[in-house]
Image (cartoon, grey):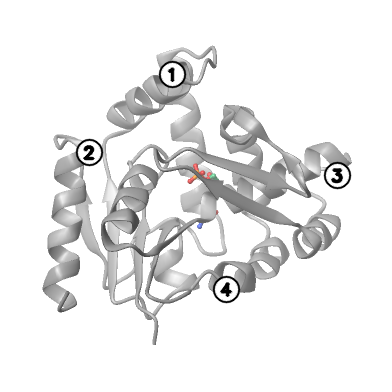
Amino acid sequence: MIPVLAIDGPSGSGKGAVGFAVARALSWHYLDSGAVYRALALAAVWAGVALDDESRLSALASELRLRFDSGLTGDVNVFVNDRDCGAALRAPEVASAASQVAALRAVRAALLDRQRAARLAPGLVADGRDMGSHVFPDAFLKVFLTASAEVRARRRYDQLKGKGFSVTLPQLIGEIRERDERDAQRAIAPLKPALDAELLDSSALSLQEVIDQVLVMVRKRLII
Ligand code: DC
């Protein structure tokens, strides 16, 4: 069986940067499942589909053509239905729209096989909200990354400012709390650690320290 490392956690916990770096260190594939929900949200906005129209959204999800072109630095160009989304995929409005479409059962079902198809040899690092609890329940290691809402908002602030978005810290703290609440309270695949997940609080750790700790956990379980 191809090994999967699942990294879940709330927005801004650092799972994207950690997942990407760990995948590179292991020479494994990487799945940013949040980008899949963001891509669907963007496709819905482009097609004028309402964010609560479950049947049209799940049809859109089944037909979604997605391509990820990753550069060496961690920057990824994402093409949704052959259209380059540029920075739009990372916009706060798209994050919020992704969180809304992600709460719909038929949408999650329509995107399940697509995510599982990313399980390719020699291994996969998958990051998201439900990688360990639903999509890859047999992952050999499940890490649940957390950090306080303030620390996460500050990280998002630096990230979004760096990409040229105009945002404020209080606005981001509010948005992060609202999105956490929706992602954690939804009936289906809510944001919560799998029972067998290792909890890792990154509030006081640097990115490199988190990457190193995850790699230590990986090496303890896999003889590599
Ligand atoms: O990780 P992110 O911020 O790019 O994710 C955007 C939204 O997508 C997030 O608010 C909830 C949803 N999501 C999800 O429901 N399940 C996942 N595995 C990943 C993301």
Q: Earlier in the sequence, mark 3 or mark 1?
A: 3
Q: Is residue 159 above or below residue 224?
A: above
For mark 1, does the 10 Å Cα neighbourhood hold few (<14), some (14 to 19), or many (20 or more) residues? few
Q: Which residue is mark 4?
A: 117
**Distance Cα–Cα, label 2 vs label 1:** 17 Å
Q: Which residue is mark 2?
A: 207
**Distance Cα–Cα, label 3 vs label 1:** 31 Å
Snapshot quadrant of residue 128: bottom left
Left or right of 219 in this view: 5:
right
Residue 49 badge = 3
Task: Locate the C terminus and report the quarter of the image it occupies.
Answer: bottom left
Q: Which secondary structure, mark 4?
A: loop
Picture residue at 71% right of the left edge, 38% below the top: 84
Amino acid type shown at disc 1: Gly
Q: Which secondary structure, mark 1?
A: helix
Q: Is residue 208 above or below residue 60?
A: above
**Distance Cα–Cα, label 4 vs label 2:** 28 Å
Picture residue at 44% right of the left edge, 33% below the top: 177
